[in-house]
Image: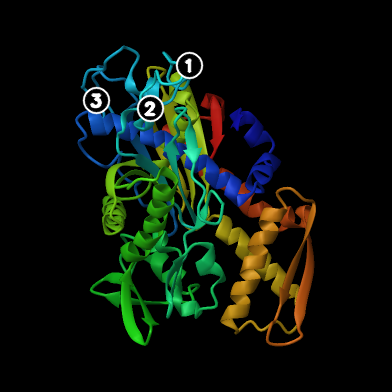
């Protein structure tokens, strides 16, 4: 996963290969990052515990793109080490070594290899704090296992990631794969809540997204509010309320796995989230019955997850192509477990969802008489295109097959990996322009980057 930056620049096909990785596999990287963030949460919980935010958002430059220089310092310190950053703790440790090394042997040095020598909630009966990645398209939850290693917690379907989709049907509220597959009105299946959480109705990004959403969003005193009907009753939901349902599911998944109540979590957020979006995310967690111990910027969590802050002085570029957004962050690791986010750049509307839609447009051009005005059929086609994209991670060719259960019609299309690269290649190569912007913000060149992390 760590790649010399020159290889990325000189061989842009590497970006294509990376992006073709299974969507679930890509989200697991952030899952591990969220897990490592749990370690920070323990430091905060047993230290001064002050503050929730790990840094401010980027400077918006208009439209969908953003960029901005950041100079936030983070210190994944041991107990007893003083620091001015929000991650440090001033409490004393017992037995030497440090809390983080006990929690995660081998990551921070001074590790204890024998079972039971490290600090763990399993050993001391501490209430469990989980790490949650609340993603645009998928969400996941993780914890620290009895061996001190990070553990991805499988959901009720046995998968490590859960679609960030909420369906409001007459039979109740459903989240995840069940919501995706539920035969409910498209107006009652809500997704992309992360795209409008903490935003204003008149924001350009919200207005553009509304053109693509099948559900209804109205203006309620400046806030974008989802309007739907459930059991004949009109409901109006803020993005926080929709995200809260996803967080409730993550909480339930963790509670079943840990066999105890979970009330505290560390949640990762995009580096460009502003204070309003961060506050709204914390509001969603509160509605879900979760106390946010810390909001951690995703690039910071990714750097910590790979232990890069403990590998000497390095300039790290985090390339994060998620389900709905694309972020590039440049982080300097000073070697004394200190991290400095010195630049961020990105695109607010570029991710796996956009690749799905490119595939769908290609399919529609090849499908004759496809019912484009049938919302359910279009939803089904989009699902098949997403599955095709994921299948191309491990296969050279796949088939997009859509059948209409109300008739004998069906549509079939072969899609090769080479064709996929041809369709999406220009967009993915265009992400290098955003990489260049981050380098300009950091006043660096590609030769200054030591490590690239694909998140």
| Mark toward the viewer: 3 or 2 | 3
Q: Disc 1 vs disc 3: which is toward the camera?
A: 1
Image position of 342 (left or right of 354): left
| Front in this rendered view, residue 217 or 68 | 217
Q: Nearer the viewer, residue 8 or 134?
A: 134
* Whole-percent x, y for residue 233 in the image: 33, 85
Q: Quadrant of the N terminus?
A: top right
* Residue that badge 3 annotates: 89
- 329 relative to 15 in the view: left or right: left
Mark 1, secondary structure of its residue: loop
Q: Which residue is mark 2?
A: 339
Q: Is residue 59 above or below residue 97?
A: below
> What's the CA distance linking mark 3 and mark 2?
16 Å
* Distance from the alpha carbon under mark 2 to that under mark 1: 26 Å
Q: Secondary structure at mark 2?
A: strand
Using the rendered image of the protein, determine whether residue 437 is visible from the camera's viewpoint. Answer: no
Quadrant for residue 97, please give it.
top left
Residue at image point 38% right, 32% down:
122
Residue that appears at 56% across and 25% down? 447
Please give the name of the residue rendered at 32% of the width and 72% of the height, measured from the top-left corner: 237
Q: Position of residue 353 (x, y in %)?
A: 56, 60
Q: Nearer the viewer, residue 112 or 131?
A: 112
Q: Earlier in the sequence, mark 1 or mark 3?
A: 3
Does residue 114 show up? yes
* Residue 86 lies in quadrant: top left
Residue at image mark 1: 113
Q: Nearer the viewer, mark 2 or mark 1?
A: 1
Rendered location of residue 144, percent (x, y): 43, 34
């Amino acid at each position: 996963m760590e790649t010399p930056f020159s290889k990325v620049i000189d061989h842009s096909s590497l970006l294509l290969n990376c992006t073709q990785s299974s969507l679930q596999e890509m989200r697991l990287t952030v899952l591990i990052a969220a897990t490592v963030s749990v370690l920070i949460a323990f430091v905060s919980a047993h230290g001064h515990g002050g503050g929730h935010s790990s840094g401010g958002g980027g400077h918006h430059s208009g439209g969908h793109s953003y960029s901005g220089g950041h100079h936030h310092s983070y210190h994944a310190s041991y107990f007893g080490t003083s620091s001015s950053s929000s991650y440090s703790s001033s409490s004393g440790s017992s037995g030497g070594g440090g809390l983080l090394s006990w929690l995660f042997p081998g990551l921070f040095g001074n590790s204890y290899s024998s079972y039971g020598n490290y600090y763990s909630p399993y050993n001391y009966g501490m209430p469990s704090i989980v790490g949650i990645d609340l993603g645009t398209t998928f969400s996941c939850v993780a914890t620290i296992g009895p061996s001190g290693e990070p553990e991805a917690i499988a959901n009720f379907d046995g998968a490590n990631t859960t679609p960030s989709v909420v369906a409001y049907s007459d039979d109740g509220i459903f989240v995840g794969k069940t919501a995706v597959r539920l035969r409910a009105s498209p107006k009652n299946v809500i997704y992309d809540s992360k795209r409008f959480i903490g935003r204003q109705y008149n924001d350009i990004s919200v207005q553009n997204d509304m053109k693509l959403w099948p559900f209804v969003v109205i203006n309620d005193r400046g806030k974008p509010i989802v309007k739907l009907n459930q059991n004949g009753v009109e409901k109006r939901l803020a993005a926080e309320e929709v995200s809260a349902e996803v967080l409730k599911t993550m909480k339930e998944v963790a509670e079943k796995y840990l066999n105890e109540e979970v009330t505290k979590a560390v949640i990762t957020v995009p580096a460009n989230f502003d204070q309003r979006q961060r506050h709204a995310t914390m509001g969603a967690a509160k509605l879900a019955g979760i106390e946010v111990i810390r909001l951690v910027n995703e690039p910071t969590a990714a750097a910590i997850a790979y232990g890069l802050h403990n590998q000497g002085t390095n300039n790290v570029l985090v390339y994060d192509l998620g389900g709905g957004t694309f972020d590039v962050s440049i982080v300097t690791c000073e070697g004394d477990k200190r991290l400095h986010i010195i630049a961020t750049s990105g695109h607010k509307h570029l991710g796996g969802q956009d690749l799905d839609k490119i595939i769908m447009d290609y399919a529609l051009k090849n499908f004759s008489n496809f019912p484009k005005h049938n919302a359910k059929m279009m939803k089904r086609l989009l699902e098949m295109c997403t599955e095709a994209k994921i299948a191309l991670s491990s296969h050279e060719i796949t088939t997009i097959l859509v059948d209409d259960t109300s008739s004998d019609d069906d549509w079939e299309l072969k899609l090769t990996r080479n064709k996929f690269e041809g369709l999406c290649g220009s967009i993915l190569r265009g992400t290098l322009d955003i990489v260049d912007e981050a380098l300009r913000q950091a006043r660096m060149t590609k030769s200054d980057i030591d490590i690239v992390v694909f998140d």
